[in-house]
Amino acid sequence: MAWQLFRLGRWSFRRRGTVVGIWAVLLLALAGGAATLSGTTHDTFELSGLESTEAFDLIKDRDPTAAPDGATARVVFRAPDGATLTDPAGRQAVTDALAALTTDNVASVLDPFTTGTISEDGRTGYASVGYAHGAADLTPADRDALEAARTVAEEAGLTVAIGGDVLGIEMDGALAEVIGIALAFVVLALTFGSLVAAGMPLLTALVGVGIGVAAIATLTGFAELGTTTPALGTMLGLAVGIDYALFILSRYQAEVRRGRPLDEAAGRAVGTAGSAVVFAGLTVIIALVGLAVCGIGFLTEMGLAGAFTVAVAVLVALTLLPALLGFAGPRATGRRTRTRAQPTDPAAAPETDHASATRAAAPRTLGRRWAEGLARHRRPALVAGIALAAVAALPAASLQLALPGDSTKPADSDARIAYDLISEHFTAGANGPLLVVIDTDEARDPAAAVDTATESLHALAARDDSHVAAVIPALTGDSPEALYAYTQQLETARLATLTVIPVAGPSDRTTKDLVADLRAALADLPDHTGARAMVTGLTAVDVDISNALIDVFPLYLAVVVGLAVVLLIAVFRSIWVPLKAALGFLFSVGASLGATVAVFQWGWLNALIGLDATGPVLFLLPILLTGILFGLAMDYEVFLVTRMREAYVHGVPARQAVIDGFTHSARVVCAAALIMVGVFAGFTLTDDIILKTIGFALAIGVLVDAFLVRMLIVPAVMFIVGRHIWWMPRALDRLVPTVDVEGEALAGHLARHTAVNTVKSTKEHIA
């Protein structure tokens, strides 16, 4: 493969105009598709086969006009001092405001006077508004009507706050991208010593991100995708795009320092570092595509979108970067490289002895001194590294998962104000009521079955540890209208719905426990009445999806890690190196989850990232973090250990090979990690809690993996194990294909090619 990549890199360098033209046409075509064909994204996390989602399906099947999973809004009204909402003026203001928000998509409006959602002092109340469609499918007229309702109430002297999911999720990562790009440019300029060289990885990464995001946006015109999907694609595409170009460009400069012609240096860089890029990219793609194993739609689409952007980043690094190097010429080599690029450079020694020649000329860099220090103190360094990682992971033991809601939004946001007002004057659980659906289709006496279920719920609520604030029965009130509606629902829809208001908020652990308690309390209903009960509502859906993710996590981990280990066995021709890499990853993900719990759940230093509320961690973070971080961790493992193996296969003793490989790779790996940390950390400055959580967790994970695991634990282990780290059973060695990521076969092929050309030229000269 190295020889094919060499030819691709050299061809891209020489045919740079063609390569740039192809990528430009592709980018413009996809941008046009995104502008004309893109659709809307949704912000719901759905999973079929759960009790909570089956209840929604049952309601829609029995009553096609119902929209149990449609968008919701809670409009909170607050009367001024000395007035109440029950005064004639206050009542009229609320009534007029609710009349103003009615549109074709509004399925129901429960005013505070009918439902009794008025505080004891009469000053605060809220109305619940249900929509026929999800937040992504609402029209501008629906949102304009909400604002019109606010204006009507405020003109009457009331204070209004609007919460719920009706406003959807707005993923604005523009600031994060600017911060990440700015930091990346500074790191690249310091690494390469050339502004031209620093700009190339940024340019290629932006092209890759542009193509990936434009393709995803175009796809939204044909399929529903989550709001987080394009943002995740941008985050990953930008990070790996810069890193992959960084590794190839660094190798290109090293080849130029050895006196290579520029086109050959580009080919060799793509043939060697490019091989590492291919396999590093494959590990990330495997980890992301592996999310499909979970069988969860929104995770699958996020994984596939992320894998696509990573694949584009690999192709761009292998082709567009050499083309840009061809346009830049010597300006991309850096001042230090141009100064040292002499044909008599010791590094230009024959291929078979290039490691010793390079070592003889290598300066005493910080990386070399660090590696030599680790070699002397390998056992204490290993113990210290493992202890530090274990301590950082301790908070993960108290990890709580939930879907972030209004309680975690900025304190000055409208949704957060509405949430706090409802929590203060009613109960936090009123922000996320639970819905109990009684299916009476096979009940002997439907009304009696509903009564039995209601009694069971009241009995549960009477317990001291029930955490139930109120049970709202299916039949509310004794008016003829209420009785008629209840009877019709039992006769036509063959179901009834009860509402349970928890004491705690939707993301509280006690509310999650309450979902299980409700299901346990109603488990005997089919035996006694023939009816069945299902607990649903957004809170129940959150609980069910979280449990489903936890259940499928071991399978996902086994599949992804297993495939990646097989791939790395082929890359390194070793059993222990891939296993060591996978175990080291566990330290990274543990420390990342621990830091995330400490900041987002415990509130440690949360003000530094603009977080003014604590709560459970994003419920899809563990499995998403595992997939992404595993791929990125293997990136650093491939780039770091490849240079160690390259020295080892050229005859360098195992201990010295680790030092030499570390010396060549550490600086570039550190620069790549800093860039990736900067890109991910930039997303912690957004207001959206989902992007903030994912960005923070990935930034910490990459930081720990690069600087603690790969710079400390990995070389310490390799120093301790010595040459046995490269052990490979003979039977397995014969079965596993040789991929030559070190470029040894490439060097031999080029040497033979040079010798043939020399003989041919000599014969022609003699003739």
Image: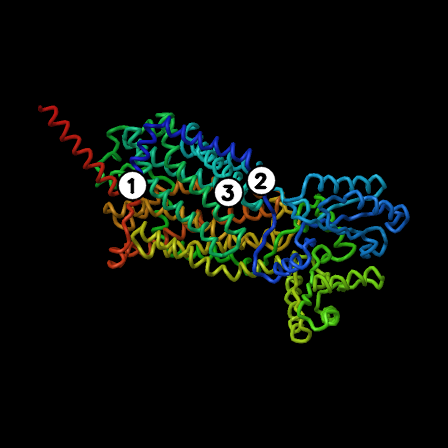
Residue that appears at 59% across and 58% down: 400
Q: Which mark is residue 233?
A: 3
Query: In terms of sequence position, does the residue under pointer 3 or pointer 1 come before the other?
Result: 1
Closer to the observer: label 2 or label 1? 2
Residue 171 lies, with reference to residue 534, above or below; the image says above
Closer to the observer: label 3 or label 2? 2
Q: Callout 3: few (<14), some (14-19), or many (20+) C-alpha neighbours within 10 Å?
A: many
The image shows residue 698 at horizontal and vertical percentages of 51, 47
* Residue at numbered disc 1: 2
Query: In terms of sequence position, does the residue under pointer 3 or pointer 2 come before the other?
Result: 2
Q: Is residue 117 visible?
A: yes
Q: What is the quadrant of residue 426 in the picture?
A: bottom right
* Residue at numbered disc 2: 39
Query: In terms of sequence position, does the residue under pointer 2 or pointer 1 come before the other?
Result: 1
Q: What coloring was used for the rendering?
A: rainbow
Locate residue 549 relative to residue 316 in the image: left or right.
right
In 3D space, how far apart are the residues under numbered discs 3 and 2 (Cα atoms)?
17 Å
Q: What's the residue type where badge 3 is placed? A: Gly
Q: What is the quadrant of residue 161 in the picture?
A: top right
Residue that appears at 48% across and 30% down: 28
In 3D space, how far apart are the residues under numbered discs 3 and 1 (Cα atoms)?
29 Å
The single residue placed furthest to the left in the displayed view is 767
The image shows residue 137 at horizontal and vertical percentages of 64, 44
Q: Callout 2: few (<14), some (14-19), or many (20+) C-alpha neighbours within 10 Å?
A: some
| Quadrant in which the N terminus is drawn | top left
Residue that appears at 52% across and 44% down: 232
Q: What's the residue type where badge 2 is placed? A: Gly
Q: What's the residue type where badge 1 is placed? A: Ala
Residues marked 3 and 2 touching at CB (< 8 Å): no
Q: Which mark is residue 573?
A: none
Q: Is residue 193 visible?
A: no
